[in-house]
Image: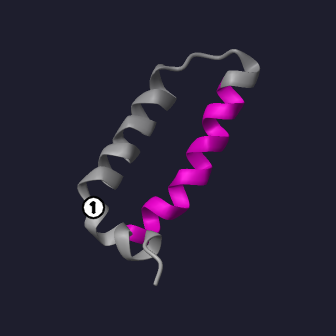
Amino acid sequence: MRRNILVLTPIMVGILAHHFTLGMGFPIPLAITAILVWMMVENREKYMPMIKTG
């Protein structure tokens, strides 16, 4: 699950930037981004070793 979120994050940034640039609707990309953020928050213990140093 951890790698999936790490792969989806830059893809979602690209989708949001694309929709922002073209002036398309934001409801679906924002909903998907909210789900992605929720998954990150729920699994934050698994991400802490990647963030912490030393």
Magenta highlight: main SS:
helix
| SS of the residue under disc 1 | loop
Q: Is residue 26 magenta?
A: no
In the picture provided, is 27 more to the left or to the right than 23? left
- Asked if residue 26 is positioned above or below residue 6 in the image, the reply reads above
Q: Residue at x 46, y 20 (%)?
A: 27
Q: Which quarter shows the N terminus?
A: bottom left
- Asked if residue 15 is positioned above or below residue 49 in the image, the reply reads above
Place of residue 33 in the rendered image (x, y in percent of width and height, measured from the top left): 45, 38
Place of residue 53 in the rendered image (x, y in percent of width and height, measured from the top left): 47, 78
The answer to whether residue 1 of the structure is visible from this angle is: no
Q: Quadrant of residue 2?
A: bottom left
Q: Residue at x 68, y 23 (%)?
A: 20
- Asked if residue 21 is positioned above or below residue 47 in the image, the reply reads above
Q: How many marks?
A: 1
Mark 1 neighbour density, 10 Å: few (under 14) some (14–19) many (20 or more): some
Which residue is tagged 1?
43
Magenta-highlighted residues:
1-19
In the picture provided, is 18 more to the left or to the right than 9? right
Q: Residue at x 75, y 20 (%)?
A: 22
Q: Is residue 12 magenta?
A: yes
Q: Quadrant of residue 19?
A: top right
Residue type indicated by callout 1:
Asn
The residue at the far front in this view is: 54
Q: Residue at x 56, y 44 (%)?
A: 12
Place of residue 9 in the rendered image (x, y in percent of width and height, measured from the top left): 53, 52
